[in-house]
Amino acid sequence: MNLNVDQLLDNLQSETRQLLNKLEIEQPLIIGIHTGGIWVAERLHAALGITSKMGILDISFYRDDFSRLGLNPQVKPSQLPLDITDQHIVLVDDVLYTGRTVRAAMNELFDYGRPASVQLAVLVDRGGRELPICAAVAGKRIDLLSNQQVKLTGPEPLQIEVVTIDSA
Amino acid sequence: MQHFLTTESLDRDQLIAILDTAESFTSVDGRNIKKVPLLRGKTIVNLFFEASTRTRTTFELAAKRLSADVLNINVNSSATVKGESLLDTLRNLEAMHIDMFIIRHHNSGAAEFLTQHISPGISVINAGDGRHAHPTQAMLDMFTIRRVKGEFANLRVAIVGDLLHSRVARSQIHALRTLGAKEIRVIAPRTLLPSHIEDLGVVAYQNIERGIKNVDVIIMLRLQKERMQGALLPSQHEYYHLFGLTRDRLAMAAADAMVMHPGPINRGVEISSAVADGEQSVILQQVSYGIAVRMAIMSMLAGN
């Protein structure tokens, strides 16, 4: 399956703009989830003309599989404003799959304060949810099999493809 | 890593991984809620057979910021005073389903002894054993150096003071060598220098003015006052006169030299107040960074 990353970004940007207009939110805080989510968030942040600095979230300390997999050796510091209380947040990730990453991200967000609202924007929603989480906006919504994976590479050039993993 | 006993047994990649992970934990410090859920449900015991304020409290804070439950056992006020052996104390604590032990003990090798008798799956962190090692202190010192200086490759480091009895110095020397510091000097009166210390890859000086020349990092060690009785030193006053870090001596080091000390400091014995509280001192930063570094080590062991 071929996905055009520019097309997906265009969709995501216009859908996000519509959503923010409808909700009457002018300057949301854009937060990207490590690593692919940051690349997407940077583009969204620029396209929407947001003046405040973008936030970065590394959810390694909040993963639900720590006891099985241990600590991610590539963990990076999260960079958020010190207090996000009463702010409108757009949380950005590259791919929405099980929903576990978003659950972890929300837990981390709430340790920084109590936001006014959190919207989820993803480049690709590929189905396969294991938690009651859904994206407010998505560049594309597709249903993939469990042996298929959406792979985003970047940051320059940003490329996206669907790969099939051989189950040996 | 199952246990964390020395810096000597770790390679460069492992030391760097600890420093990088600690870097991420520093972001927790400034937040509204200074806690992450990594060690939720785990029980950690601070088992201290020697007095400690900084090390014990920063271990406790680190564990609490990882959401673990912490027990502090100070042996002065516990059953050991009533004659219980280390192994019996251990067995009793194990029966309470502990996940991690942090131990400080006056005997070298005590932490390793614990690992040989402990049930599988339980981690041990050495918080100082006799004259042998104090690896978490060494790692927080490396973290502080990297934060201020960036790289290790071009650094000249001087460690000044009671090298003979210092477990901190030993752990620092191993870590600095593994991380590739350019030059490591040790400065002390002859009575406080271990014989063959050069075998560790350091250059020994018995004169502070010569030893401190052009160094980028000065690590002061605490002069343990109890050493004064063993005829190793004539008097505190004379020690300060010959080896104390004063402004005049600091001026002989590189212009941007940083001054470190593991604490507790003896003002007017190994360091002057003007230097300890001066612009080049990072002594209090060391304490803050100790929390992030200990969080990193604990979470890396727990996620093993």
Image (spheres, coloured by chain):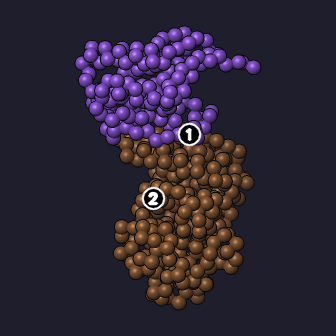
Q: Amino acid at mark 1?
A: Gln
The one nearer the camera, B75 or B5, is B5
The chain shown in brown is which? B
Q: Secondary structure at mark 2?
A: helix
Rendering coords of residue A86 (x, y %): 27, 30
How far apart are the alpha carbons under marks 1 and 2? 22 Å
Of residue B49 and residue A20, the one placed in the foreground of this image is A20
Question: What is the quadrant of residue B109 in the picture?
Answer: bottom right
Measuring 71% from the left and 18% from the top, which residue is drawn there? A166
On whether disc 1 and disc 2 are found on a single subunit, the reply is: no
Total marks in image = 2
Residue at image point 69% right, 57% down: B9
**What residue is shown with label 1?**
A74
Residue B125 in sight from this viewpoint: yes
The tint chain A carries is purple
Residue that extends furthest to the front in the rendered view of this protein? A157
Query: In this view of the protein, can residue A136 be seen by the observer?
Result: no
Residue A3 at what x, y percent from top left? 52, 14
| Amino acid tagged 2 | Val
Q: Quadrant of the C terminus of chain B?
A: top right
Q: Nearer the viewer, residue B198 or A101?
A: B198
